[in-house]
Image (cartoon, helix red, strand yellow):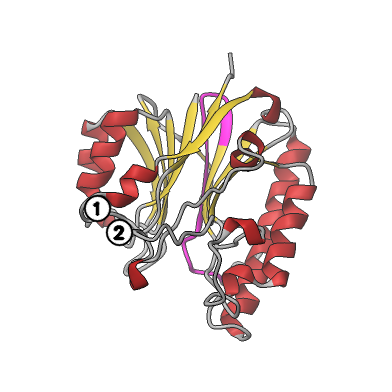
């Protein structure tokens, strides 16, 4: 079972890119972030024609998350992240697909920091940890996949000082992600490639893609019962180099769930 996550950075603008990648790789489950489309504007017809059922939470202008399932309809288990009834930002959706609970998440960027946006980021990550703890307690196989907007370690960003004040690399954000992982989750990409340099995001500015000046922001976390079933993981880097590309590349994991 291949589960992928892809910050598409505007699903309608980059629909052709998405459909091309789906046709080439045929992942079983895809978690999408940054739909940048309201609920009614999601391209359901085109996605279904490509062979995928979909569950999505759209939002005009920014945010928005979705789960696609090849030849199946995702069964909703959560339509938002619990813990703050007043939070209207659509950054989390969760569904059961073929016996696995899959969450697609888009954590807040948090810039500028310090300030209210960074405080919201840390609160959101704490809420994610609470939800993740509940899922662990339920004893079901779970995948938490998405754009966490956190660079876990110094080796997950190219050599630079330009991000030193960025919310993506702040100690508080890194500690929040580490607390989540330490609860029992496995960072699949790092587990599969313990010493490799891995990037999933290259900013459009300052020629960062041609220079391979990247960051690892997109992560797939596996619950303890799924971690031993990890057989491979990777980044489809070439997708980032295509015309009209997102500034993220898809990340995928292969799981033996037979």
Element class at badge 2? loop
Report the quarter where the C terminus lies: top right
**Picture coordinates of residue 249 (x, y %)?**
40, 49
**Picture coordinates of residue 164 (x, y %)?**
60, 77
Q: Does the magenta portion include 140?
A: no
**Picture coordinates of residue 39 (x, y %)?**
32, 57
Asked whether the beta carbons under mark 1 and mark 2 sit within 8 Å of each other, the answer is yes
The count of marks equals 2
**Residue with the mark numbered 2:** 10
Q: Which residue corresponds to the image point at 74% horizontal and 63% vertical from the top-left?
A: 175
Quarter holding residue 193: top right
Q: Which residues are magenta?
A: 87-101
- Of the numbered discs in the image, which one, if any, rests on residue 14? 1
Q: Does the magenta portion include 89?
A: yes
Relative to 112, does residue 158 appear above or below in the rendering?
A: above
**Picture coordinates of residue 202 (x, y %)?**
41, 60
């Amino acid at each position: 079972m291949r589960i992928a996550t892809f910050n598409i950075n505007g699903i309608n603008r980059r629909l052709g890119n998405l459909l091309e990648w789906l046709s080439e790789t045929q992942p079983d489950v895809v978690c999408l972030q940054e739909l940048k489309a309201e609920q009614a504007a999601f391209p359901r017809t085109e996605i279904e024609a490509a062979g995928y059922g979909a569950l999505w939470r759209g939002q005009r202008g920014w945010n928005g998350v979705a789960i696609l399932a090849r030849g199946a309809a995702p069964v909703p288990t959560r339509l938002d992240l619990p813990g703050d009834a007043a939070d209207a930002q659509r950054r989390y959706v969760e569904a059961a697909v073929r016996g696995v609970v899959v969450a697609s998440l888009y954590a807040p960027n948090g810039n500028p920091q310090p300030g209210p946006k960074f405080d919201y980021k840390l609160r959101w990550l704490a809420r994610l940890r609470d939800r993740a703890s509940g899922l662990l307690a339920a004893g079901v196989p779970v995948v938490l996949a998405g754009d966490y907007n956190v660079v876990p370690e110094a080796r997950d960003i190219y050599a630079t000082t330009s991000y030193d004040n960025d919310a993506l690399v702040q100690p508080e954000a890194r500690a929040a992600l580490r607390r989540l992982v330490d609860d029992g989750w496995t960072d699949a990409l790092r587990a599969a490639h313990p010493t490799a340099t891995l990037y999933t995001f290259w900013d459009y500015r300052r020629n960062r893609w041609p220079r391979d000046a990247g960051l690892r922001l997109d992560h797939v976390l596996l619950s303890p019962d799924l971690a031993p079933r990890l057989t491979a993981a990777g980044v489809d880097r070439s997708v980032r180099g295509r015309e009209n590309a997102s500034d993220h590349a898809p990340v995928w994991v292969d799981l033996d769930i037979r």
